[in-house]
Amino acid sequence: ERKATEVPIDLDHVIQIGGGVNYSIALTAEGELVTWGKIYEYRRRIGGSVYIDPTCPRFVNDFVSIKSSWFSVVATRDLCPACTPADFNRDGRVDHTDLDFQHSLLGSACRDSNPDACLVDLDHDGVVGLSDMGELLSQWGSCACAQADLDQNDRVDDDDIQFMLAMLGQGCFEEHSDACRADLNGDGGVGLDDYALFLNLKEDCACATADLNGDGLVDTIDMFVLFDQLGQACTNPFSAACQADLNSDGAVGLDDLGLLFAQWGPCD
């Protein structure tokens, strides 16, 4: 009979579990691999092998399946992970394509025979409903914007730059802490590499907001899309008016047109 040690932390949304002689492993719906007990990481090197006893529990992102045997465990990583759970088609943004896919599965139950329903069941209650659509809308837009919005006020601006500068030199020790949000490269500390990555994300986010047709280019097509919405109020997040409200002030105006011209050209 396999042995499992006591779970050292509360785990949410576990979809797979496994155990060996003296270790346990769990996979969450978010793609986190959690291990605890007496676990060894096996690495090959010239002249032999080395075993490393890592700190447990250990989280590793973007795993999709696990297999365990008496003495070993194998985890399969997703080589093309979604940038956020609602990015169903993995194109780096949550938009109408993802919304239409989720809408087509409204009312469906999450079962092994219907994995698409499990994918879009964002609140993990077993059924695809309106609450899942609400969760998708909370993740709406370019993932670059979500990552660069360090102060989490739904816009990327100079306040986020100040946030990043204040975190420089800090270590990421607690998940969801300010320092961990600023640790964009995930190396355990906030440094100049994170600042450079933030500036790239900020630039990508700015382009993403004005690229209204999503073709990777801010041009006359986007300008005409915005012209069609001039004077309209943003009252429905699904509407074209909200998409064209680039400064998020609740209406489409000349300020939004100015932002579009400031982002003119290819996104890269």
Image (spheres, helix red, strand yellow):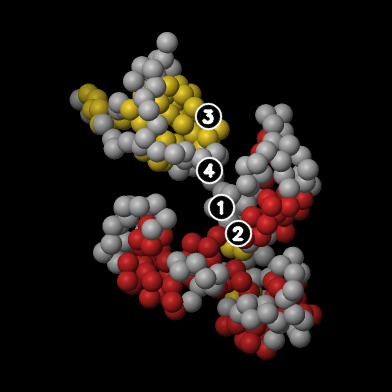
Q: In this figure, which residue is indicated by the disc labeled 1?
A: 84
Q: In this figure, which residue is indicated by the disc labeled 4?
A: 30
Mark 2 lies on a secondary structure that is loop
| Rendered location of residue 113, percent (x, y) | 71, 29
- Position of 13 with respect to 228 (left or right) is left
Distance (Cα) linking label 4 and label 1: 9 Å
Q: Amino acid at mark 3?
A: Gln
Distance (Cα) linking label 4 and label 2: 15 Å
Q: Nearer the viewer, mark 1 or mark 3?
A: 3
Q: Amino acid at mark 1?
A: Thr
Which residue is found at the position 30% from the left and 67% from the top? 168
How many discs appear?
4
In which quadrant will I find the N terminus? top left
Residue extending furthest toward the top: 1
Decide: few, some or many residues near mark 1? Use Cα within 10 Å; few <14, some 14-19, many ≥20.
some
Marks 4 and 3 close (CB-CB < 8 Å): no
| Rendered location of residue 74, percent (x, y) | 44, 26
Q: In this figure, which residue is indicated by the disc labeled 2?
A: 139
Q: Work out whether residue 261 or residue 228 is closer to the camera in this orientation and state it.
A: 228
Q: Work out whether residue 51 or residue 35 is closer to the camera in this orientation and state it.
A: 35
Distance (Cα) linking label 4 and label 3: 12 Å
Q: Earlier in the sequence, mark 3 or mark 2?
A: 3
Q: In this figure, which residue is indicated by the disc labeled 3?
A: 16
Q: Earlier in the sequence, mark 4 or mark 1?
A: 4
